[in-house]
Image (spheres, helix red, strand yellow):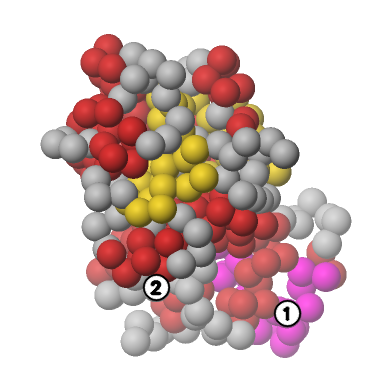
Amino acid sequence: MTQATKVAVVGAGIMGSAIATRLIEAKQAVTVFDLDKAKVAALTAKGAAAAASVAEATRASSFVILSLNHADIVRSVVFGDGGVAAAGSPEKLLIDMSSIDPADTAQMAKKLAAETGMKWLDCPLSGGVPGALAGRLTVMAGGEAADFEQARAVMQHLCANYTLMGPSGAGQTTKLINQLFCAVLFQAVAEAVKLAEAGGVDPKAIPAALKGGRADSSIMQEFMAKFAARDFSATGRIDNMLKDLDSLQAFALKTKTPMPMTGQVVEIHRLLCAAGLGPRDSAEMMRLLDGKTS
C-alpha cells in the first residue's frame, strides 16, 4: 500500500472543506486549520487531524494547501505570527488554491523562498465544490516545473486537468481569464433566458437544442435551466466573482489591456452587490433583468 501523503489544508470554508474531504476520502493524511472550530470539527469527524495553528499544520505536513479569500489573508497566514513561514523548510511545498492577484503571488512566493527555502505553487481552480468532491477540478498552476511535478502527489486526487501555465503568478493570471469567461457567459445566459421567454420559447429547451454547436458551453448546459427556473440555490457568490473581476480590471489597467465587454459585466456585478445580492448565487442576475432586487 502506498504511504499516505501528509497534507495541511488551511482554510475550511466551502472550497477548503471540499478539498480536504476529497483528500480524506483518497486516504491522505490531512491536517486542518481554520479559525472556525465548527468547520474544523466537521472535517475531523471525517478523519482529519486538527492543528492549533498554521505553523503546527505546516510542521506536520509535506504540502500546505491554502484556500483563502483574499491576498491580505494569504499574506497574514503565511508570514504572520505562527504562520506557514514559521515552520517552512526547503522540503515542503506551499500550494495556494486561493484566487488572488498575480503580482501579489509572485512577490510572496519570492519572499517565502528567500526566508525559508520553501517553494510556492499558485494553483487556483475551476470546477467548484462538485469538481473538488469528485476529483475533477481544473487547476492552472504557476511556478517551477519541478514543484509542479512534486505537487502531483496531491493534485492527482483533486484534478482532472492540471496544467503548468508558466512562472509564479501565471496560474493566477489564467484564473482571471477563466473568471472573465464565466462572468460574461453568466450574463449571456441570463439575457438569453429573457429573450427566449419574450419569444415564447422554453429556455430550458435551449441547452439541448444548441448542444454541440458553436454557442454550446458547459455554463449554458449547467446553468440555463437553473436561471430559467429562478433557482437561486447557492453554487457560488456574486461578491466573490466581483473580487476576482476587480483583480482582473486592475491587472488590465496595469498592462493597458482594453476590456470593454468585461468592464460592463464588472459593473453589473457591482450593481448586484450594491443591491445587497453579493452573498447570493449568480442566478440572482435574473432578478435584475426581471426588474426585482429582493
Direction from residue 23 to residue 44 in the image, left or right:
left
Q: Using the image as rendered, state which of residue 259 and residue 219 is in the foreground.
A: 219
Q: Which residue is mark 2?
A: 280
- Labelled disc at residue 204: 1
Under mark 2, the amino acid is Arg
Decide: few, some or many residues near mark 1? Use Cα within 10 Å; few <14, some 14-19, many ≥20.
some
The residue drawn where x is 56% and y is 29% is 151
Above or below, 71 against 91 in this view is below
Q: Position of residue 32 (x, y in %)?
A: 38, 51
Q: Quadrant of the C terminus?
A: bottom left
Q: Using the image as rendered, state which of residue 17 and residue 15 is in the foreground.
A: 17
Q: Using the image as rendered, state which of residue 278 and residue 58 is in the foreground.
A: 58
The residue drawn where x is 69% and y is 36% is 2
- Give the Cα distance between marks 2 and 1: 22 Å
Span colored in magenta = 183-208
Under mark 1, the amino acid is Lys
Q: Is residue 203 magenta?
A: yes
The residue drawn where x is 28% and y is 33% is 84
Q: Position of residue 196 (x, y in %)?
A: 68, 78
Above or below, 92 against 277 in this view is above
Decide: few, some or many residues near mark 2? Use Cα within 10 Å; few <14, some 14-19, many ≥20.
many
User: What kind of element bears circle 1?
Assistant: helix
Q: Position of residue 45 (x, y in %)?
A: 46, 67
